[in-house]
Image (cartoon, rainbow, N blue to C red):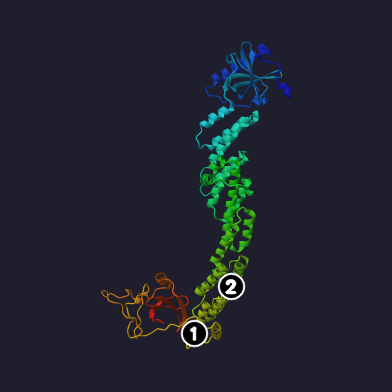
């Protein structure tokens, strides 16, 4: 059967009356017989108007719905309706004929398709005129709850099929708005438990993009989800994934943009990325796209340099290449990486430490930081890696203090500790002599300091001399013992007992009285002594600390007042 056979060649008035009457009489009789036979409501299939001429629907009761093309008048009334999607005419029985055409643009009919010769006619038994698809769509959407995204997507699919069928741009526009509204609802839902942060909005953006939704809503949803993910994520692989998604969903994010965002827009964007993105102009949206990429890359680089501080140079180069609008970022990465190296330097092998120190000093020009790295590493070794009788370890460490830092004082202290452990250690003697230290009996004298003189006296000095802050303004008695503190009711001139300082740590002394004018160290009888000197109006005072082992913390052993020089 070709298309020409489907076209009716005659109108309703040209159909022989007998055939026309017999057609309706047959439909009416059969319908009446079925009604009498069964009280159950019969389900009538709905068929596309463009398909009603198919053999499977011939002489079967069906329902069709379509836009109306025209009404044809026969005699005094309108008894024929032509539809947009089919050439088969809709013939109305006498009781359904109209005095005037309906203003409604669409019709819904039930009835049967019959074939008379080569001609098809739809013999209507019921008829209803309905609003346009756009109006019906608006009515159905208005009846939905504000959060029913699924039903909105179903209505959008229904309206989209009609918009394509009738090539209706206005209906297509309505479909796009409805679908965008549905994806916006989905994107603002809370993420499912256990799902990655921002996943609801990101998936909604992908679905909206796949469905051909407005790019602005796609990108707005992407901002909502990706910004949420960026805030929550703190692992390098996750941030690398986010940066790829930013590039995929926001093409403008990969290009440097000109201009600046207003402060108010930026603050609004931080609070509500989706709403702000939909409201600003195109230039601002492009800048927001780029901002999201820059923020993602910057956070990823800062985390990478913390995890891999040995890759400072390559990460700095990546920052310069990928984010040229932030030239200061490379230096920030360098500083953070160097800080990481400093934090982790204690665990380095000596050769790796020397290599790192040279890199920091020569490549990055950070001489002071290189010195800090060396000192931190050396101090850590001295505190944790030297056994109590390890003379060789102390000698090696002393050489490193000299070689890495030029710290003669720390080296000399270690050389003296070597001699305390092994008095016959010739290389320690030679090393001290090379540093200018001189032997005075069984002790070594620092060339830069004058050895203190502890004066014994049978009587205490004048107690009314002002000795602020630091107690101990009393000279030891002949026996070397500090006099007993005053009785509770006895008022002492300096209101403090030096004996009360015994046992305090160096940090506690510094906290109470500040830093001393100078210090000296010595090793004698298996103990390491350190002396701090304070100048006060009443004279010079000496606080002596003792450390019984390398790993112990120095504490106050005694406090003396020295006579004025």
Q: Is residue 242 left or right of residue 470?
A: right
Question: Is disc 2 placed on a helix, strand or loop?
Answer: helix
Question: Is disc 1 placed on a helix, strand or loop?
Answer: strand
Q: Where is residue 565 in the image (x, y as percent from the top left)?
A: 41, 82
Can you tell which mark lies on residue 39? none
Residue for point 55% across, 37% down: 181
Q: In which quarter of the image is residue 237?
A: bottom right
Q: Which quadrant is the N terminus positioned in?
A: top right
Comparing 420 with 21, the one in front is 420
Q: Is residue 396 above or below residue 201?
A: below
Residue for point 64% across, 49% down: 254
- Res 113 visible: yes
* Measured Cα–Cα span from mark 1 to mark 2: 30 Å
Q: Where is residue 54 in the image (x, y as percent from the top left)?
A: 67, 25
Q: Where is residue 176 in the image (x, y as percent from the top left)?
A: 60, 35
Q: Is residue 397 above or below residue 109?
A: below
Q: In this view, does 153 lie to the left or right of 475?
A: right
Q: Is residue 379 above or below residue 77?
A: below
CB of mark 1 within 8 Å of CB of mark 2?
no
Q: Is residue 210 left or right of residue 550?
A: right
| Residue matched to label 1 | 444
Q: Where is residue 482 in the image (x, y as percent from the top left)?
A: 34, 81
Numbered disc in front, either 1 or 2:
1
Q: Sequence-wise, which precedes: disc 1 or disc 2?
A: 2
Q: Residues within 10 Å of mark 1 (few under 14, many from 20)?
A: some
- Res 1 visible: no
Comparing 352 with 439, the one in front is 439
Q: Quadrant of residue 5?
A: top right
The single residue placed furthest to the left in the displayed view is 489
Comparing 386 with 432, the one in front is 432
Can you tell which mark lies on residue 350? 2
């Amino acid at each position: 059967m070709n298309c020409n056979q489907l076209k009716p060649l005659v109108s309703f008035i040209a159909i022989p009356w007998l055939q026309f009457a017999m057609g309706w009489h047959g439909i009416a009789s059969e319908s009446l017989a079925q009604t009498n036979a069964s009280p159950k409501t019969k389900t009538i299939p709905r068929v596309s108007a463009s398909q009603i001429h198919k053999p499977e629907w011939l002489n079967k009761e069906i329902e069709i719905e379509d836009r109306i093309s025209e009404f044809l008048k026969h005699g005094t009334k309108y008894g024929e309706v032509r539809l947009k999607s089919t050439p088969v005419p809709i013939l109305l029985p006498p009781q359904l004929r109209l005095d005037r055409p309906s203003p409604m643009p669409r019709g819904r009919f039930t009835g049967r398709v019959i074939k008379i010769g080569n001609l098809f006619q739809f013999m209507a038994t019921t008829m209803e005129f309905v609003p346009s698809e756009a109006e019906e769509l608006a009515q159905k959407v208005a009846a939905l709850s504000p959060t029913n995204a699924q039903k909105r997507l179903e209505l959008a699919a229904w309206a989209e099929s009609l918009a394509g069928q009738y090539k209706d741009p206005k209906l297509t526009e309505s479909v796009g708005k409805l679908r965008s509204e549905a994806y916006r609802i989905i994107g603002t839902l809370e993420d499912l438990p256990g799902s990655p942060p921002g996943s609801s909005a990101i998936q909604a953006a992908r679905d909206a993009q796949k469905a051909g939704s407005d790019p602005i809503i796609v990108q707005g949803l992407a901002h909502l989800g990706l910004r949420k993910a960026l805030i929550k994520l703190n692992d390098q692989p996750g941030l690398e994934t986010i940066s790829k998604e930013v590039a995929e969903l926001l093409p403008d994010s990969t290009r440097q943009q000109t201009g600046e965002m207003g402060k108010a827009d930026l603050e609004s964007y931080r609070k509500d990325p989706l709403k702000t993105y939909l409201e600003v102009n195109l230039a601002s949206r492009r800048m927001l796209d780029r901002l999201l990429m820059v923020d993602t890359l910057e956070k990823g680089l800062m985390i990478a340099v913390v995890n891999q501080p040995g890759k400072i140079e390559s990460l700095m180069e990546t920052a310069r290449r990928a984010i040229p609008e932030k030239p200061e970022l490379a230096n920030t990465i360098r500083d953070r990486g160097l800080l990481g190296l400093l934090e982790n330097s204690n665990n380095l092998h000596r050769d790796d430490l020397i290599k790192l120190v040279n890199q920091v000093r020569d490549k990055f020009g950070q001489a002071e930081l290189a010195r800090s790295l060396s000192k931190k590493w050396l101090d850590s070794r001295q505190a944790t890696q030297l056994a109590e009788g390890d003379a060789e370890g102390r000698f090696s460490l002393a050489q490193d203090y000299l070689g890495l830092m030029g710290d003669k004082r720390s080296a000399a202290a270690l050389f003296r500790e070597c001699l305390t452990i092994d008095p016959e250690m010739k290389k320690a003697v030679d090393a001290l002599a090379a540093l200018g230290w001189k032997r005075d009996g069984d002790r070594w004298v620092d060339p830069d300091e004058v050895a203190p003189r502890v004066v014994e006296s049978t009587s205490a000095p004048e107690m009314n001399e002002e000795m602020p802050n630091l107690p101990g303004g009393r000279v030891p008695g002949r026996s070397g013992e500090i006099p007993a503190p005053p009785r509770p009711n006895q008022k002492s001139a300096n209101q403090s007992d030096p004996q009360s300082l015994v046992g305090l740590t160096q940090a506690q002394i510094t906290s109470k009285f500040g830093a001393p004018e100078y210090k000296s160290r010595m090793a004698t009888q298996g103990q390491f002594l350190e002396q701090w000197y304070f100048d006060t109006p009443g004279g010079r005072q000496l606080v002596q600390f003792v450390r019984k082992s390398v790993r112990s913390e120095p504490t106050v052993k005694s406090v003396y007042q020295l006579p004025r020089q």
